[in-house]
Image (cartoon, helix red, strand yellow):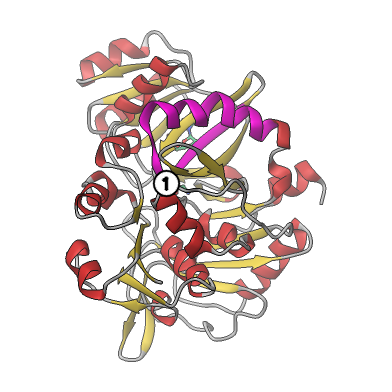
Amino acid sequence: MKVLVIGSGGREHALAWRLRQSPSVKEVYATPGNPGIAQVAHCDSTRDYVQFAQRLGVDLTVVGPEAPLVAGVVDQFRALGMPIVGPTAANAALEGSKVHSKRFMHRIGVPTARFETATTPAEARTALLAFRYPVVLKTDGLAAGKGVVIAQNPAEAEEAIQQLPCPLVIEEFLSGEEVSFIVLCDGKKALALEPSQDHKRIFDNDQGPNTGGMGAYSDSLILTPEQRGHILETIINPVVSATHFTGFLYAGLMMTPEGPSVLEFNVRMGDPETQPLMMRLRSDWGETLLAAATGALPDTLEWDPNPATCIVLAAEAYPNTPKTGQVIEGLDTPGDAVVFHAGTKAVDGKIVTSGGRVLGVTAKGATLRESIDKAYRAVANIRFEGMQYRKDIGQKGLKRYNT
Ligand code: AMP
Ligand code: GLY
């Protein structure tokens, strides 16, 4: 079959790369794609997704990022009977509006931090009186992972109120380990992918501002079978039943002493979580996604038991306005890793930086430690001016699982 991938980041490169290797997939197309995706798919910059898919006669479309989902691309495809993997615009509001998402969780009894909502700065100041510090402030709409502030004291909370557009969610701070729990849904049931863990802060030891994600690893040891069952039962299945959810549902969880609690829902795969996940997946991805789009999800997926790790190489100044246009060197010597492209562009036969997160260097190993070491060895071959990356991706996993 012919499959179209919508998007242009590292997640979409990993999706297209895995699809390219699926026995059921003959051609992969991507819009807009990037120079890395162009190695495994035919790229085109059109934004008229329906017309592009029709012209190519694609059998299946998969949507990477949230923006087209929130804008209703799945509804458009469905109206024309074209198979697509993703949620309707109504269900994409689980990610598109934090106020909606928190109220929905509260209504159906999904565990999440205690919260208040505020439509004006004055309301936010009043709401804050009901919380201890640290407290978490979140802007309602899409913010590419940058709409959340953890305020340690009233002065920081005031600064956040002035900086974040209203409406706001103000919520209790939770502590514990964060886990990305992603499931694929067909409207009736959910099939869990392997667990993964992101690294949201820009600097080592979880310091500095939040980013879209600076690295991720996937290791089956992150969650026991009992924990997975509990998450499916108390969080995922109630959401799928209440919404007839289709596509990827990503629960950003805090594993608190009282049990897993939802920090956020995303309605797509994670970036960079997708990169290690695609490296570990063994099932035919094209066949699995088509099954999801046609309401016939299988009961299991086959995974490589070996862990995988992705290190994000970011541009200077990210997560603020990144410096772009720097020539990237060393891309042709990835060693044992796969270098997924995110913010890259081809200019005069060279690959240059064009966004905040530039590359995702991803490797698999017999142990988590081996996957981390292989990924960092490959990173050492790559250079561009101002390149920054975290040196501690996966370290918490190593400490916890002792592998
Ligand atoms: P979100 O976009 O809601 O996932 O928030 C981004 C990041 O902020 C999360 O990955 C957490 O690291 C942190 N965060 C969000 N909500 C909370 C909370 N209630 N308690 C502690 N940390 C949080
Ligand atoms: N890695 C976090 C996200 O995709 O939202």
Please check the rendered image and state whether residue 180 is part of the magenta-colored stretch, yes or no: no
Q: Is residue 355 left or right of residue 233?
A: left
Residue 302, position in %: x, y?
65, 56
Q: Is residue 21 left or right of residue 126?
A: right
Please check the rendered image and state whether residue 245 is part of the magenta-colored stretch, yes or no: yes
| Closer to the camera in the image, 167 or 239 | 239
Query: What's under tag 1, amino acid-wise?
Result: Gly
| Closer to the camera in the image, 76 or 234 | 76
Q: Residues within 10 Å of mark 1 (few under 14, many from 20)?
A: some
Residue at left 26%, top 35%?
A: 90
Badge 1 is on which residue? 295
Residue 166, position in %: x, y?
22, 28
Residue 228, position in %: x, y?
65, 35
* The residue positioned farthest toward the right in the image shown: 402
Residue at left 48%, top 30%?
A: 263
Q: Which residues are magenta?
A: 227-255
Q: Identify the secondary structure beneath mark 1.
A: loop
Residue 385, position in %: x, y?
44, 75
Q: Is residue 379 positioned above or below 296 on the image? A: below
Residue at left 35%, top 63%?
A: 60
